[in-house]
Image (cartoon, rainbow, N blue to C red):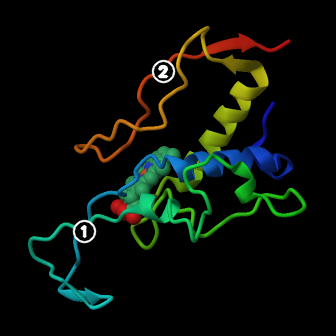
Amino acid sequence: MPSYAKRNLLPYTAATLAEVQRIKPVAPLSVPHQASRDTTLNGYNIPYEGFVIVINLWSVHMDPRLFPEPDTFQPERFLDNHGNFLPRETLIPFGIGHRMCLGEQLAKMELFMLFVSLMQRFTFKLPEGAPKPSMYGNFNAASFVNPPIPFELCAFPRE
Ligand code: HEM
């Protein structure tokens, strides 16, 4: 059975989940914010009244100075030379600052447990002749989340 307490024994799994969240964050534009008072940031005036602030998390994940060849899926970028999981502070799928995701720890645990359980029990293959799943999301401007475009996959129980 997977154990979250022993997640350090599965560094490649941790790196894969990190890379999934880097390349396709669930909420690429975080959620809309507003300044609590008139303020400035990097020389820009940010008024309190009437302005919505949208933080582009996705642009950080796709910055080639932080993640070389950002369009390619490379879990190894989250591993050190000894194969240990290498956390990176520029991976920010849960946002940053005082209003970052309250459910981060729960979500990380759920992702790990679900992913490991599925990988232990099944081998996944595309149906014969089916196209690869699209790497584009289906961004929903009302909810600000970016779910995948539906795709078909066969799950074969493992021996
Ligand atoms: C993979 C799963 C999840 C991702 C990627 C995610 C991501 C985010 C992001 C990007 C924000 C906005 C942060 C910001 O404004 O800077 C957020 C806010 C929030 N999330 Fe999540 N979230 C996830 C799961 C969850 C879960 C499981 C819960 C609760 C059980 C949760 C509760 C919240 C709450 C309450 C906020 C608002 C925090 C605030 O405004 O102070 N999230 N989340």
Q: Amino acid at mark 2?
A: Phe
Residue 143 image point, x, y percent: 28, 44
- Which residue is located at x 43 percent, y 38 percent? 136
Disc 1 is placed on an element classified as loop
For residue 42, the mark is none
Residues 150 and 52: in front is 150
Q: Please tell me how crowded label 2 is: few (under 14), some (14-19), or many (20+) other residues with Cα within 10 Å.
A: few
Residue 17 image point, x, y percent: 65, 46
Residue 138 image point, x, y percent: 35, 36
Position of 89 with respect to 96 (left or right) is right
Q: Is residue 97 above or below residue 154?
A: below
Looking at the rendered structure, the number of numbered marks drawn on it comes to 2
What's the CA distance linking mark 1 and mark 2? Answer: 33 Å
Position of 69 with respect to 4 (left or right) is left
- Which residue is located at x 75 percent, y 63 percent? 86
Residues 78 and 130: in front is 130
Position of 64 with respect to 80 (left or right) is left
Q: Is residue 158 above or below residue 145?
A: above
- Which residue is located at x 63 percent, y 46 percent? 73
Q: Quadrant of the C terminus?
A: top right
For residue 53, the mark is 1
Q: Please tell me how crowded label 1 is: few (under 14), some (14-19), or many (20+) other residues with Cα within 10 Å.
A: few
Position of 76 with respect to 30 (left or right) is right
Question: Mark 1 or 2 closer to N-term?
Answer: 1
Disc 2 is placed on an element classified as loop
Q: Quadrant of residue 41?
A: bottom left
- Which residue is located at x 55 percent, y 24 percent? 132
Q: Amino acid at mark 1?
A: Ile
Report the residue that reaches farthest toward the left. Answer: 50
Front position among marks 1 and 2 = 2
Q: Which residue is mark 2?
A: 151
Q: Quadrant of the N terminus?
A: top right
